[in-house]
Amino acid sequence: ICNSAISNRKVIEKEFLALEEKLKEKENLEKELDKTFFLISSKKENLSIITSEMTLLQKQILSFSTAFNEKDYSLSIENLKLLDKKIKELNQKSSELLAKEKALEELRKDLSERRDRFFDISICPTCLQNVPNSHKHNILNETEGKISDIRKQLIEASAELSNIQNNLELGNNEREKLEKEKTRLEILRSKKEDTIQAQKRLDDYKKQSSSLDKDIILLEKHLESLRTDISSFSKFAQSAKQKQDELKKAFLDEKNAEILLAEKRKELELTTN
C-alpha cells in the first residue's frame, strides 16, 4: 500500500510540475504580450508625431509654390545699377545747374548795381570829363543786353533743373519699385532654399512613416499570435489547480500509508514476541 501511494504521488507530482512549466510559459507569453503592446503604442505615437510634421511640411511646401527665376533676379539687379547710375548723373547735373544759377544771379546782380552806379555819375573818375548821355545809353544798352542774356540763361537753367528734378522723382519712384521687386525675388529665393530643405525632411519622414507602418503591422500580427497562444494555455491553469489538490491528497495518502505500515510492523513485532 505504501509503495503504491508513493508511486501515485510521484506520478501526480510529475504531472503537476509539467503543468507548472506550462503556466510559466504562459507567464512569459503574457510578459511578451505587454512588451509588444508597449512597442505598438510607442510606434503609433511616433507615427502620429511624424504624420503631423508631414502635414505641416506639405502646407509649407505648398505655400512656397511660387517659382524663383534667377534671370528675373539678375535683371532686377542690373536695372537697379543702371538706374542708380542715371540718378547719380542727374544729381550731379542738378548740382551743376544750381551752381550755374547762383553764379548767373550774382553776375546779374553785379551788372545791375554797376549800371545803376554808372547812371549816377556825371564826371568820369578816370579822365575827369563829363560823361555824355549818349555814352551812358550805349553802356546801358550793352549792360541790359548782358542782363537780358543772363535772364534767358537763368530761365533755361531753371527749366532744365525742373526737368531734371521731375526725372529724379520718376527715377526714385522707379527705384523704389525695383527695390521692392528685388526684395520680393530675394524672399522667393530664400523660400526656394527652404522648400528644398522641407522636401528633404518630408522625404525622410515618409521613409520613417513607411518603416513604422510595417513595424506596427508585424507587431500587431505578433500580438494576435501571442493572444492565441495565451488563450491555448488557459486550460492548464484549471488543470494545475486540480492537480495541486490531487498532489496534496496524494501526499496525505502517502503519509497515512506510512503510518499504517508502521502500525502493522509494530503489531507484527508484538505477535512474534
Image (cartoon, grey):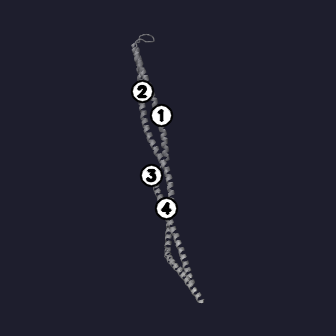
Bin the neighbour count of mark 2 within 10 Å (Cα to Cα): few under 14, some 14-19, many 20 and up. Answer: many
Residue 84 x/y as whole percent: 48, 37
- The numbered disc on residue 218 is none
Tell which circle, 4 or 3, labels the residue nearer the N-terminal end. 4
Q: Are marks 2 and 4 in contact (CB under 8 Å)?
A: no
Measure the C-alpha gap from mark 1 to mark 3.
42 Å
Residue under label 3: 63
The three-letter code of the residue at mark 1 reads Glu
Answer with the quarter of the image where residue 3 lies.
bottom right
- The numbered disc on residue 89 is 1
* Circle 1 or circle 3, nearest the eye: 3
Tell which circle, 2 or 1, labels the residue nearer the N-terminal end. 1
Residue 66 x/y as whole percent: 45, 50
The three-letter code of the residue at mark 4 reads Ser
* Circle 2 or circle 4, nearest the eye: 4
Measure the C-alpha gap from mark 2 to mark 4.
87 Å
- Residue farthest to the front? 273
Measure the C-alpha gap from mark 2 to mark 1.
21 Å
Measure the C-alpha gap from mark 4 to mark 3.
32 Å
Bin the neighbour count of mark 3 within 10 Å (Cα to Cα): few under 14, some 14-19, many 20 and up. Answer: few
- Circle 1 — which element? helix
Tell which circle, 2 or 4, labels the residue nearer the N-terminal end. 4
- Circle 4 — which element? helix
Tell me: 154 left or right of 219. left
Residue under label 2: 154
Tell which circle, 1 or 4, labels the residue nearer the N-terminal end. 4
- The numbered disc on residue 42 is 4
Tell which circle, 2 or 3, labels the residue nearer the N-terminal end. 3
* Circle 2 or circle 3, nearest the eye: 3
Q: Is residue 133 above or below residue 61?
A: above
Residue 108 x/y as whole percent: 42, 22
Q: Are marks 2 and 3 in contact (CB under 8 Å)?
A: no
